[in-house]
Amino acid sequence: MKSPRLLAAALALAFATAACGSSTPTSTSDGPATLDVWLMKDSVTPDFLQRFQSDFEAENANIKLNIQIQEWGGIGQKVVSALASNDAPDVIEVGNTQVAQYAASGGVVDLTDKVDELNGKDWIPGLRDPGAVDGKQFGIPYYAANRVVIYNKDLFAAAGITAPPKTRAEWLETTAKLNQGTTQGIYLPGQNWYVLSGFLWDEGGDLATKDGDKWKGGLGTPAGAAAVDFYRSLQALGQGPKDSDEAKPQQTDVFSRGDVAQLIAVPGAAGLITKANPALEGKLGFFPIPGKTADKPGAVFTGGSDLIVPQSSSHPDQAYKMIKALTGEKWQTELAKAMNYVPNRTSLASALAENPGAAAMAAGAVNGHGTPQSPNWAAVEAKNPVKDFLTAVLTGGDPVAEAKKADDVIAAALNSGK
């Protein structure tokens, strides 16, 4: 899943005094319309797009789609510029965590009155919540992906483990059994802040919360302390580095050696693993990240995309019609089957039943979350004090003192955008 760079600082400078858009779509023309649509590279296959476009245009004779594929690199500033212009596209795909900063420009149509018509009560929370700002729905959920546990079936069998764990406590017990001899129970790098975020959400906390009109970091809370304590216990049951993330080294390369029992990643990582070591083909299993109790999977960060309509769209009614089709049951089901993404509705998870990795992902998606809904969140990720916090704690630092340091950086970034 893509994690596009958020350009909140630039947005805040450009639109510091603007208010959020609040108008609903109104038609500018009753005649034929050509919609300019920006979709992101590799989000879907050309075949899927061609099928959707042909079907949509056949059912809507007065609408033509001009779909333009955009690169993720630099897309933030491009969208910012488009929203500030009088000649924006009619529909734009954006990362779900980007919606808040774009809505802050006042250049995005408020679609709150369309939520019921779009079955919004059924949307997965990790897409629904980031698309809403101050109680108004600006982003319409498109698709999602989240992390699961990928495991080596042979190593589980050798340890006498016949079923994946269902709770955090069972997960620690299982991983300890696996972490014997030359086998690592789990490969968890010390700076995987997305994984820590899930444990934090499970404890009822968040990376940051708003107190009045000011933000404050959430690591120095009881929830933060419990989350990092569990992270530390799990991370110790393997040989993951304490001072780097999942890309240094590439965790799929480490897992492909065959001596690691578990890995936390999106299901698509399995393809990279078997490409690096074909001998593991058919030997990989998947399960949702366990929660504190067996009746609910662990919380996960939901990455994915939403669709927005710019205020300066020339054809807002038709743009909404196109979004309604692409995010509706028919094409969400087709998208899930074609791309193994989590569809935007919880009730459509069965579309992934025949794919074990995607099915595990969909099961976890019901407890999906997004980053704090601040237009300045990009400034936090740019510094990423959560990574520094993790490394400090894992290498013997005082959790309370280190949490305060990280929280101060988070608060400063969110309250000033710097």
Image (cartoon, rainbow, N blue to C red):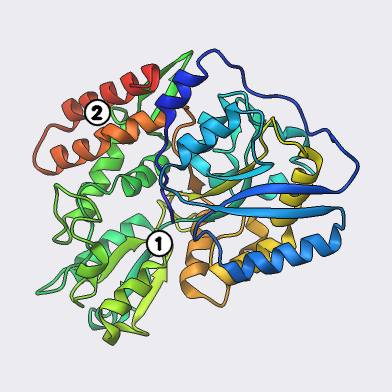
Q: Nearer the viewer, residue 247 or 149?
A: 247
Give the quarter of the figure containing the N terminus.
bottom left
Q: Nearer the viewer, residue 4 or 357?
A: 4
**Where is mark 1, residue-wise?**
266
Taking the image as drawn, is residue 350 in sight? no
Query: Relative to 339, is 7 above or below?
Result: above
Density class for disc 1 (Cα within 10 Å; few <14, some 14-19, many ≥20) is some
Q: Nearer the viewer, residue 343 or 316?
A: 316
Residue at x 46%, y 58% (from the top left corner): 294
Q: What's the CA distance linking mark 2 and mark 1?
A: 27 Å
The amino acid sitting under disc 1 is Val
Residue at x 18%, y 29% (from the top left corner): 402
Give the quarter of the figure containing the C terminus.
top left
Q: Secondary structure at mark 1?
A: loop
Position of 58 with respect to 68 (left or right) is: right
Q: Position of residue 333 (x, y in %)?
A: 67, 66
* Name of the residue lying farthest toward the right: 30
Q: Position of residue 57 (x, y in %)?
A: 80, 60
**Where is mark 2, residue-wise?**
406
Taking the image as drawn, is residue 303 in sight? yes
Query: Relative to 3, is 355 above or below?
Result: below
